[in-house]
Image (cartoon, rainbow, N blue to C red):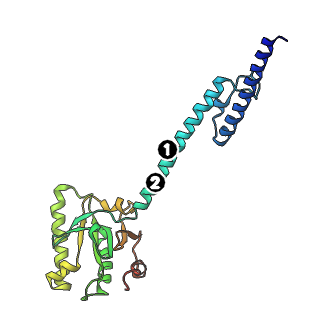
């Protein structure tokens, strides 16, 4: 064999060795990331251990695609975790209280709060629950905020003035029959119309009629619990236990 032939043969051997080494490295990396069968297919005429330039390019593209998808998945999981964690925060909902006319922003509470959320047809039931809660402290200073949020989105705009008058009558009845003192009524009685049903989404309340849920908020800006049925005083007491003893 001539010197030229020997040089050519050595070059072929080195190329073959490099190809096999590269193939083994790529195979090892590819085994860690699932590849689509169509992207792993080789020409039938090619030996199993030999990877053509086209096949190597296909694997690289697939690995890049898988890495991209994995990155998107990690980002998506991170966002879901972030959102899940932040749904425990008190939403920035604002209502105009019936009677007193004062603005109530849930985000600004410095004390615990108990909110009874209902539709108009069972608002009386929610109001009675609230009254039982208040009676345990009345006429002492209230250690937490309590209110009735009434879901009224289905009321058309032209009829809302009528509903406002009816709610004001309910407020005046409570004032006349129970508290007698307008200043106490402003402090204790909070009827909050929810004209957009914002409480449904904010507290993940099932969108069913009639709804009757109890929401307990902590003073630290976090949602303590949501009870998706007519709550008993025992359930409310347990939710308030970290801050208040009923």
Callouts 1 and 2 close, C-beta under 8 Å: no
In the visual, does 242 lie left or right of 45? left
Up-down relation of residue 32 to residue 136 (above or below): above
Look at the image and tell me in which quarter the C terminus lies. bottom left
Place of residue 188 in the rendered image (x, y in percent of width and height, measured from the top left): 23, 80
Residue drawn where x is 49% and y is 51% of the image: 77
Residue 159 percent coordinates (x, y)? 18, 59
Label 2 element class: helix
> Which of these two is toward me, 138 or 209?
138
Residue farthest to the front? 3
How many dots with numbers? 2
Q: Quadrant for residue 243, please give it.
A: bottom left
Asked where in the image residue 145 lies, by quadrant, the reply is: bottom left
Q: Which residue is mark 1?
A: 72
Q: Which mark is residue 175?
A: none
Left or right of 240, for residue 137: left
The span from disc 1 to disc 2 (Cα, nearest Å) is: 12 Å
Q: Residues within 10 Å of mark 2 (few under 14, many from 20)?
A: few
Left or right: residue 47 versus residue 26 is right
Spot occupied by residue 71 in the image (x, y as percentages of width and height): 51, 44
Q: Nearer the viewer, residue 30 or 146?
A: 30
Q: Nearer the viewer, residue 10 or 135?
A: 10
Query: Which element is circle 1 on?
Result: helix
Q: Tell me the residue at 15%/62% (across/down).
A: 161
């Amino acid at each position: 064999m001539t010197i030229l032939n020997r040089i050519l043969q050595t070059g072929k051997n080195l190329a073959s060795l490099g190809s096999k080494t590269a193939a083994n490295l790529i195979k090892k990396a590819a085994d860690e990331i699932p590849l689509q069968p169509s992207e792993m297919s080789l020409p039938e005429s090619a030996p199993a251990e030999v990877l053509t330039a086209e096949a190597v390019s296909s694997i690289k593209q697939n690995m890049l695609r898988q890495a991209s998808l994995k990155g998107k998945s990690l980002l998506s999981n991170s966002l879901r975790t972030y959102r899940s964690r932040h749904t425990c925060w008190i939403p920035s909902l604002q209502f105009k209280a019936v009677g007193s006319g004062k603005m109530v922003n849930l985000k600004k509470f410095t004390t615990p709060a108990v909110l009874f959320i209902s539709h108009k047809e069972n608002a009386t039931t929610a109001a009675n629950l609230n009254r039982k809660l208040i009676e345990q402290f009345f006429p002492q200073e209230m250690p937490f905020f309590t209110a009735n949020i009434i879901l009224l989105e289905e009321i058309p705009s032209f009829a809302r003035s009528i509903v406002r008058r009816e709610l004001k009558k309910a407020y005046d009845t409570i004032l006349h029959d129970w508290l007698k003192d307008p200043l106490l009524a402003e402090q204790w009685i909070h009827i909050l119309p929810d004209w957009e049903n914002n409480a449904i989404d904010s507290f993940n309340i099932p969108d069913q009629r009639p709804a009757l849920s109890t929401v307990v908020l902590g003073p630290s800006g976090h949602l303590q619990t949501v009870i998706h049925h007519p709550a008993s005083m025992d359930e409310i007491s347990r939710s308030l236990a970290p801050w208040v003893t009923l």
